[in-house]
Image (tube, rainbow, N blue to C red):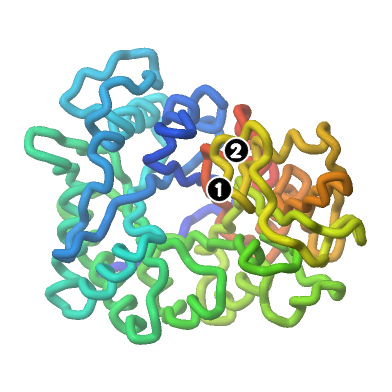
């Protein structure tokens, strides 16, 4: 039976973004904002996060109100929601009506301990793997969301986000992806539609070393590399959260904590370049109590930076791009690391350092994605679109850089 398909054109790059179902709450970010910002004109794929893996080893709706019940969300195309399908799912269908080439995938899992444990249990036997794949396909690709409620035609594929398989899960992880591919191919034979199968692929060697990358990649359409969070406030020393290359000045040099090191590892383990999609964070990581030496880079700190004023989505040590982009006008200097091709912000008055991706660093990363291998990498995705600014600046920068 056929495996995943290589894309025919290296010019038609993926520009993707994760949309978190909870965006409609504290962030007040809706699917309609994807259209309003202009991001929908550039996006090729939206990955909807998340569905759960239940304790019984089946796919499950994580938030029924947000997913398909909320009747109050703003319309995407100006037409009222007729029901019985409401919520983000109905809004995404409207978005697809405006953009017929847009693909929407359901992302299954996420970082919760429950999902991690349930993945491990569900995949321990052939029967468990078959049940999990079958339930996910029926729920999302067939659209059997709830009694009397259908989301048929919404989802074009499945993204597996198991964070993260351990060494004991290695063989079962490969078998799970193969089972999904087999069942998706069987569905395709019935419907004549091409359904995508992808994974959220870890950047840390301690995690991707537990995945048989080359074997898994044969079953996938593409892999979404989580090329961010290389450094953060779990460390006391300031550093870049998503550096492209290693700097000779970096105290962590030699540890493989760069985008290029991750890409190289995947390529060396047999993953084709045209299946690698580079991850771009729409948020930054920050430290405070940082001395005014080297504009704060590679310096000690007293702890996580406090949330910037006005950033309702921030927590200590983490802030959105939309807020960080305003800091250069509020006492912060913007600096560029031409070894790592990473940018950062520093205020000597606040003794605060923020590492983040901005249009300059994203432009360089898109050039890298185009040139890293013959034909280039497959494209790039953003985590997460609610954290971009109101004009979707990072999404638009990604699209320009790739095309």
Q: Which mark is residue 388?
A: 2
User: Which quadrant of the figure contains the N terminus?
Assistant: bottom left
354 left or right of 201? right
Do the residues bearing badges 1 and 2 touch, measured as CB atoms within 8 Å? Answer: yes
264 left or right of 194? right
Front one among 396 and 305: 305
- Is residue 196 shown above or below 387? below
Q: Which residue is found at the position 42% from the left and 30% from the top? A: 31
User: Which image quadrant for residue 170?
Assistant: bottom left
Q: Position of residue 351 (x, y in %)?
A: 82, 51
230 left or right of 274? right
Task: Determine which residue is flagged by label 1.
Answer: 382
Farthest-out residue, right: 293
Q: Which residue is found at the position 35% from the left and 32% from the top? A: 92
Front one among 302 and 59: 302
Q: Which residue is found at the position 54% from the left and 53% from the top? A: 9
Q: Which residue is found at the position 39% from the left and 40% from the top? A: 22
Farthest-out residue, left: 147
Circle 1 SS class: strand
Question: Which tag is nearer the camera, tag 1 or tag 2?
Answer: 2
Front one among 258 and 335: 335
User: Which image quadrant for residue 218?
Assistant: bottom left
Q: Position of residue 347 (x, y in %)?
A: 84, 46
Circle 2 SS class: loop
Real-space Cα separation, disc 1 to disc 2, in angstroms: 9 Å
Q: Position of residue 234 (x, y in %)?
A: 61, 67
Front one among 26 and 174: 26
User: Which quadrant of the figure contains the C terminus?
Assistant: top right
């Amino acid at each position: 039976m056929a495996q995943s398909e290589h894309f025919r054109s290296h010019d038609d790059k993926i520009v993707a973004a994760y949309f978190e179902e909870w965006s409609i709450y504290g962030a007040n970010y809706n699917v309609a904002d994807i259209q309003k910002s202009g991001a929908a004109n550039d996006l090729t794929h939206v990955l909807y996060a998340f569905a759960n893996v239940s304790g019984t080893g089946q796919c499950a709706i994580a938030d029924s109100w947000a997913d398909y019940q909320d009747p109050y969300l703003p319309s995407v195309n100006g037409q009222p929601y007729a029901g019985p399908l409401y919520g983000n799912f109905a809004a995404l269908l409207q978005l697809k009506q405006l953009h017929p080439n847009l693909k929407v995938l359901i992302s299954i899992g996420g970082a919760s301990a429950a999902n991690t444990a349930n993945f491990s249990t569900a995949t321990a036997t052939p029967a468990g793997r078959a049940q999990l794949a079958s339930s996910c396909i029926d729920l999302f690709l067939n659209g059997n969301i709830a009694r009397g409620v259908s989301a048929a035609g919404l989802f074009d594929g499945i993204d597996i986000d198991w964070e993260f398989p351990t060494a004991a899960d290695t063989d079962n992880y490969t078998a799970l992806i193969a089972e999904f591919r087999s069942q998706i191919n069987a569905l395709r034979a019935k419907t004549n539609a091409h359904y995508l199968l992808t994974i959220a692929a870890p950047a840390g060697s301690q995690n991707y070393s537990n995945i048989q990358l080359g074997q898994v990649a044969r079953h996938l359409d593409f892999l979404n590399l989580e090329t961010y969070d290389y450094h953060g406030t779990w460390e006391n020393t300031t550093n870049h959260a998503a550096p492209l290359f290693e700097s000779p000045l970096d105290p962590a040099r030699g540890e493989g904590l760069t985008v290029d090191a991750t890409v190289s590892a995947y390529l060396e383990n047999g993953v084709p370049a045209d299946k690698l999609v580079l991850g771009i964070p729409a948020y930054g990581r920050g430290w405070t109590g940082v001395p005014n030496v080297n504009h704060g880079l590679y310096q000690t700190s007293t702890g996580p930076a406090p949330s910037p004023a006005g950033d309702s989505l921030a927590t200590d040590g983490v802030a959105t791009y939309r807020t960080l982009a305003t800091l250069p006008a509020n006492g912060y200097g913007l600096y560029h690391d031409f070894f790592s091709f990473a940018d950062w912000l520093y205020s000597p008055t606040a003794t605060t350092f923020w590492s983040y991706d901005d249009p300059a660093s994203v432009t360089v990363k898109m050039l890298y994605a185009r040139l890293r291998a013959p034909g280039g990498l497959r494209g790039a995705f953003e985590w997460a679109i609610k954290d971009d600014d109101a004009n979707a600046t990072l999404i638009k920068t990604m699209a320009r850089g790739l095309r």
